[in-house]
Image (tube, grey):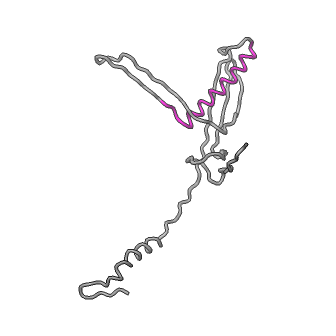
Amino acid sequence: MLIFNRYEVRLFTLPMLPILLLLSACSSSVPEANVTPLNYEFFAVGYAAIAAQQGESADVKMLNAIKASKLEAYKELAEQVYGVMLTSESNVHQYQLQDDTLKVGVSGLVRGAKVLRTYHEGDLYITELGLNTNTLPFLKQAEFADNESVINVPSQVYY
């Protein structure tokens, strides 16, 4: 009960006002946004020249080209997923460019990629890789992770 006199408000009603304001603020609810997971697909192609490989025979060179093209495809896939780290340095002396250096690097862990095709044409060995992020159940904290497909594995202690 709030009783107003001509110049004062009863003291027992003043502590109730902040509680009433707090309860009224809690009663309003915000509708939840319907968030759908994003579907990312990545494709990469790696090339390797068979004749440029080291080896005693043509078969060994072919095996080395297969490995090199697969690694090149994984590197291309990591560039798409994680990006490329560029480092540039230029040296200028008396307003003239003396030296210009550009370094490029890729670092990342690619899991779940599938070899789509592997073949050779002429002297080139070609490997095609694909990565679909919907099929990756181990992704956690990623922007494209689907919470329903994350597998939680309990920790184990092995003696």
Q: Report the magenta residues as a range.
A: 57-85
| For residue 116, above or below residue 66 | below
Q: Say which residue appears at 43% left-offset and 25% top-offset.
A: 88
- Label count reads 0
Q: Is residue 68 left or right of residue 27?
A: right
Point out the image quarter for the C terminus: top right
Image location of residue 51, percent across then percent down: 67, 14
Picture quadrant of residue 40 = top right
Left or right, residue 138 beside residue 34: right
Instruction: Report which quarter residue 66 is drawn in.
Output: top right
Residue 118: give x, y in percent of width and height.
Answer: 71, 28
Residue 109 spot, x, y in % from top left: 60, 36
Q: Looking at this view, is 69 or 101 the one in front?
A: 101
Q: Looking at the image, which residue sits at the far left?
A: 7
**Residue ID at (38%, 74%):** 18
Residue extending furthest toward the front: 159
Q: Is residue 6 left or right of residue 148?
A: left
Q: Is residue 114 magenta?
A: no
| Picture residue at 28% right of the left edge, 16% below the top | 94
- Foreground residue among 159 and 107: 159
- Viewer-proximal residue among 97 and 153: 153
Where is residue 155 shown, x and y percent of the image? 67, 48
**Placement of the N terminus among the 4 image quadrants:** bottom left
Q: Main secondary structure of the magenta part?
A: helix
Q: In the figure, residue 108 lies in which quadrant?
A: top right
Q: Residue furthest top?
A: 56
Q: Is residue 62 magenta?
A: yes
Compared to residue 31, the image places residue 151 above or below, namely: above
